[in-house]
Image (cartoon, helix red, strand yellow):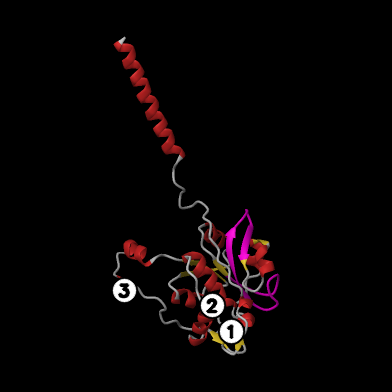
Amino acid sequence: MKILNLKRIICTLMCCVMLGMLFQVTNVPAAEGDKKELNVVYYNQADYPGKKIGKSTIKAAGCGPTCIAVCYSSLTGKKVSVPKMCKIAYKKGWYINGQGCVHQVIPGLAKEYGLDCKGLGTNYEAIKKALKNGHPVVALVGPGDFTKNGHFIVLTRMVGKDKVKVADVGSRANTAETWSLKKVVSQGKEGADAGGPFWEISYTEPEKQVQEKGIDHGLLKIGNKIDLKKHIEN
């Protein structure tokens, strides 16, 4: 009788161990390469009537700063002032009256607001990878589906093998659509500089930067002096 009870106890323990191993296998956390979703915060240029960028208006010429506002709020969860961003862009020389924003406005404003910016050129796979990692990609597009001249938009996430959602800061209708990533990339503005016409935007909290890099808070610097190249989006 005692031997029988011992066998039952052993069997019960073995079952518990096997269930524990199964639980560990089926509850493995997502790997870094898995698709990540971006919680998009949308801003539209037309929502600031009468507000200026240089001698123009945000509605007419503020797409670049508005795109960085979308990236900043989506990545950090914090609200930001689009008119203030436009004032900074103008003060830094990233907006030229009568012409528009220079391409440097994207990496420039990103650094001003503590974001990381990486120029991707027109590398389709790099753009796709950035979006799958939950990083928005600012795009400077030329004549085509989004503009007759030049316009900044934000690619926000992949929704299929070649399908992408965008935040077009000048059009809510375009924002509601789903686009072919290859088609969007093909419309990238030719002759773009500053790493464009596509830029990956990401954010690392200062505390994590210190932990990962082992550097002192006093050494964290943003908004470094930039050699400005005066090319415009129009």
Give the CA distance from mark 2 to mark 3: 28 Å
Label 3 Cα crowd, 10 Å radius (few <14 / some 14-19 / many 20+): few
Q: Residue furthest top?
A: 1
The C terminus: image quadrant: bottom right
Whether residue 157 appears in this view of the structure is yes
Which residue is pictured at 48% across the width and 77% down the height?
109
Q: Amino acid at mark 3?
A: Leu
Q: Nearer the viewer, mark 1 or mark 3?
A: 1
Measured from the top left, where is residue 176 in percent x and y? 67, 63
Question: Does 86 appear above or below 71?
Answer: below
Give the CA distance from mark 1 to mark 3: 36 Å
Which residue is pictured at 37% across the width and 29% down the height?
17
Residue range (magenta) = 139-166
Q: Amino acid at mark 2?
A: Val
> For residue 16: magenta?
no
> Could you tell me which secondary element the residue under label 2 belongs to?
helix
Which residue position is annotated with label 1? 51
Which residue is pictured at 54% across the width and 60% down the height?
131
Which residue position is annotated with label 2? 82
Measured from the top left, where is residue 85 in percent x and y? 51, 79
Q: Which mark is on residue 12? A: none
Which residue position is annotated with label 3? 219
Sequence order check: which comes first, mark 1 or mark 3? Answer: 1
Question: Does 111 appear above or below 11?
Answer: below
Which residue is pictured at 34% across the width and 65% down the height?
207
Would residue 38 be found to the left or right of residue 113 on screen? right
Would residue 119 be found to the left or right of residue 221 on screen? right
